[in-house]
Amino acid sequence: MFIKKIGIDLGTNNVRVYVPKKGTVINEPSVVAISKNDGKILAVGLEAKDMLGRTPDSISAEHPLKEGVIANYKTTEAMLRYFINKALGGVHLFRPEVMVAVPSGITSTERRAVIDATIAAGARAAYLIKAPLVAAIGADIPIGAASGHMVIDIGGGTAEIAVISLGGIVAWGSVRIGGNRFDLAIAEYIRRKYNLAVGVHTAEEIKKTVGSAMFISKPLTVDIKGQDMVSGLPRIVTVTSDDVTEALQHELDLLMKAVKDVLHDTPPELSADVMDKGIILTGGSALLRNLAELVVQTTGVPTYVAEDPLFCAAKGTGIALENIDSYKRSILATR
């Protein structure tokens, strides 16, 4: 009765922590600021993100995860410890049980790294579960049923596509396409078209403000500030939703190809189920305008954006941890 349970959506760009009966208690960037002189952790989360691009030579602000997996073990451990302690709050006598969402294509070595880092960060026990499964659970999809459900979970570093039946993944695909690649594509397009240099944060704001996966009849516009590539002076240009759509064409084409590949690999009976129930979009990039419509146009399958797509995976980890016996077939590894 004293054992705390915590679900963690360990994302490339953001960490979301879910505590049963409380909901999502933390939603912060997965960024850590480190002193280069002594390796000391200076800031984590929101405070560290504010330092990105603004640090002196003696400080490094970085994302310890790249494309959904651990790139820096020590920094990831420190980040996990910070978020676990923050979620528990105050003095806690008992170490928590922690469920972590990981990519479908994670290797055994990467899996071990996540478990070890979670235990070292203060967990009593660590459980891993594949991101599309918890995204589906968080989207209220009955993954244990003997019928097919398809989920596309698009995060900052990767897009995970899976057809789920009887608590397991039957067909899946994972592509290194997500919010980060979208932002870089937008920044590069603006540099080429307008001769204007903008940072990824500005590109992200453009995506959120006027971004669309398909061309729209009345394009949206936004004024942005950047650095003129010739004069080096600040300049303002007007960017349209059509600009963003054109900038994202290559990335979206690759994403749609991956979706079609997974549908091609899906057994006929489950394909019929997917056609009946539709495809569910989760993850932060599911919020891109008209993305669901693009999937429908590409596949012919009804497609819907989950309620609160940003928090589906975090919510799913908490639900799976609360009902661990029901989802034990879905859990990858424990310690």
Image (cartoon, helix red, strand yellow):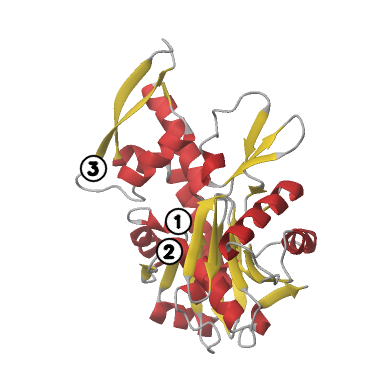
Label 3, label 2: how many angstroms apart (C-alpha)?
Answer: 25 Å
Q: Name the residue tied to disc 1.
A: 284
Image quadrant in which the C terminus is located: bottom right
| N-terminal-most mark, 1 or 2 | 1
Question: How crowded is the residue under tag 2: few (<14 C-alpha within 10 Å), some, or many (20+)?
Answer: many
Between discs 1 and 3, the one toward the N terminus: 3
User: Farthest top residue?
Assistant: 231
Dot 3 and dot 2 residues touching (CB under 8 Å): no
Pointers 1 and 2 in contact (C-beta within 8 Å): yes
On-image quarter of the N terminus: bottom right
Residue situated in front as seen by the camera: 148 or 93: 93
Query: Can you see residue 162?
Result: no
| Coordinates of residue 228 in the picture (x, y in percent) | 40, 17
Locate residue 301, reporting x and y percent.
39, 71
In the image, residue 209 sits, relative to residue 297, either above or below, namely above
Q: Which mark is residue 219?
A: 3
Residue 239, picture quadrant: top left
Few, some or many C-alpha atoms within 10 Å of disc 3 (few <14, some 14-19, many ≥20)?
Answer: some
Cβ–Cβ below 8 Å for labels 1 and 3?
no
Give the Cα distance between marks 1 and 3: 22 Å
Which amino acid type corresponds to the residue marked 1 in the rendered image?
Answer: Gly
Which numbered disc flags the more N-terminal residue, 3 or 2? 3
Specify the farthest residue to the front. Answer: 91
Question: Which residue corresponds to the image point at 43% horizontal and 71% vertical from the top-left?
Answer: 279
Residue 325 pos. (x, y %): 64, 87
What kind of residue is marked 2? Pro
